Image: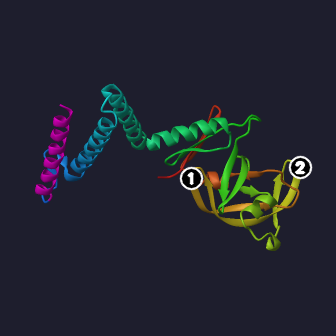
Amino acid sequence: MRSRLLWILLIGLALALILLIANHDTGTVGPFSTDDFAALARKIALLVFLCSGALIMFRESIGKALQIVAIWIVIGLALALGYTYRFELRHAYDRVMAEMMPGRAASRGRVVEIARGNAGEFGISTRVNGGTVPMILDTGASAVVLTQEAAKAAGLPLEVLNYNVTVDTANGKTRAAAVTLDSIGVGGLVERSVPALIAQPGQLRTSLLGMSFLNRLESWEVRGDKLVLRGYP
């Protein structure tokens, strides 16, 4: 009985191969395209191989053989589902990590969400000219402002900066150097040629993500404890 079933399956696969060859020029096999039909045939062939291998290994125990086959089928289905929904699973992973690690961006296409930190601020992990720079959202800052350390991480030439821009801070007036950053990235959003300021040494503890970046976006808003950034399509 088992041998007869195996032969039936093998004959079926042979017929599938014949159908593929015969319909190669038309591009379809019944309701399937030839590519889809070939993929289905490959999966059936793999299943036949696993089933026959299990039956040969466990000839004396059909129950155990069927159990092994069932396990492989479940594994195959899990892998297929994981591959099919890989983008949704990736987004779910990013959201979980963003909740556990405030400042980490959860991206979905051109939309980025960031959770509020324990101190009530939106700390944001950014990429400036390829270097990782932590920033604080500051909608009162007209431009992105980098500390000396952040400017160094971004590969900016600190030795030639000219601190000739007067800026107002909570501690009074100070001077900063005007630069244009090659790129600033937050999650899946990347803006290029962004104007920014470099604070003088000791004048700023944390870099600020200001309006020279936010104004590049289609929109941004705070929803409860979430900062939502939307880039242009």
Quarter of the picture holding the N terminus: top left
Return the residue nearer the eye: 160 or 211. 160
Q: Can residue 58 be seen in this snapshot?
A: yes
Determine if the magenta segment contains residue 56: no
Question: Pointers 2 and 1 in contact (CB under 8 A)?
Answer: no
The image shows residue 225 at horizontal and vertical percentages of: 65, 33
**Circle 1: element type:** strand
Q: Which mark is residue 171?
A: 2
* In front: label 2 or label 1: 1
Q: Can residue 142 be seen in this snapshot?
A: no
The image shows residue 97 at horizontal and vertical percentages of: 61, 39
Q: Is residue 143 above or below residue 124?
A: below
Residue lying furthest bottom in this view?
160
Return the residue nearer the eye: 155 or 198. 155
Q: What main secondary structure does the magenta stretch of the protein show?
A: helix
Return the residue nearer the eye: 160 or 218. 160
The image shows residue 62 at horizontal and vertical percentages of: 30, 28
Decide which of tag 2 and tag 1 comes sooner along the chain.
2
- Residue 19 relative to residue 43: left or right: left
Residue at 29 percent across and 35 percent down: it is: 55
Q: Amino acid at mark 2?
A: Asn
The span picked out in magenta is: 1-24
